[in-house]
């Protein structure tokens, strides 16, 4: 399977960044830090040799998980509890 095109990677990352706006319990600084962490995933996503939805989801979930409880769910970003 071909690798993701840069445009596709940017769209995936933009979707994640847009989800940050819908997490009201995060402070502005926490949102900024999370955006930086999302943007750092560009090279990893672009380098996947066989990108599938499940592989992308689980990889990003693992890479973006946070000790404070912020993470991914099938519906988007999870808020800390």
Image (tube, grey):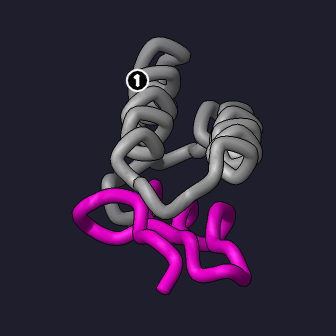
Residue 41 visible: no
Q: Residue at x 46, y 55 (%)?
A: 56
Which image quadrant is residue 48 in?
A: top right
Where is mark 1, residue-wise? Answer: 11
72 shown above or below 81: above
Side of 20 where 39 appears, left or right:
right
Q: Which residues are magenta?
A: 56-81
Q: Answer whether residue 47 is magenta in the image.
A: no
Q: Residue at x 35, y 64 (%)?
A: 54
Residue lying furthest left in this view? 75
Residue 38 visible: yes
Residue 23 on image: x %, y %: 41, 55
Side of 38 where 80 appears, left or right:
left
Q: Residue at x 52, y 70 (%)?
A: 71
Side of 15 where 30 appears, left or right:
right
Q: Nearer the viewer, residue 81 or 18?
A: 81
Q: Nearer the viewer, residue 14 or 10?
A: 14
Secondary-structure class at tag 1: helix
Q: Nearer the viewer, residue 54 or 15?
A: 15
Q: Residue at x 65, y 42 (%)?
A: 28
Residue 20 on image: x %, y %: 46, 45
Q: Nearer the viewer, residue 76 or 52?
A: 76
């Amino acid at each position: 399977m071909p690798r993701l095109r840069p445009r596709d990677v940017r769209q995936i990352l933009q979707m994640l960044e847009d989800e940050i706006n819908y997490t009201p319990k995060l402070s502005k600084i926490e949102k900024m830090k999370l955006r930086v962490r999302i943007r750092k995933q560009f090279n990893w996503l672009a380098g996947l040799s066989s990108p599938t939805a499940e592989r992308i989801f689980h990889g990003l979930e693992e890479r973006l998980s946070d000790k404070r409880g912020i993470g991914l769910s099938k519906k988007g970003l999870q808020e800390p509890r």
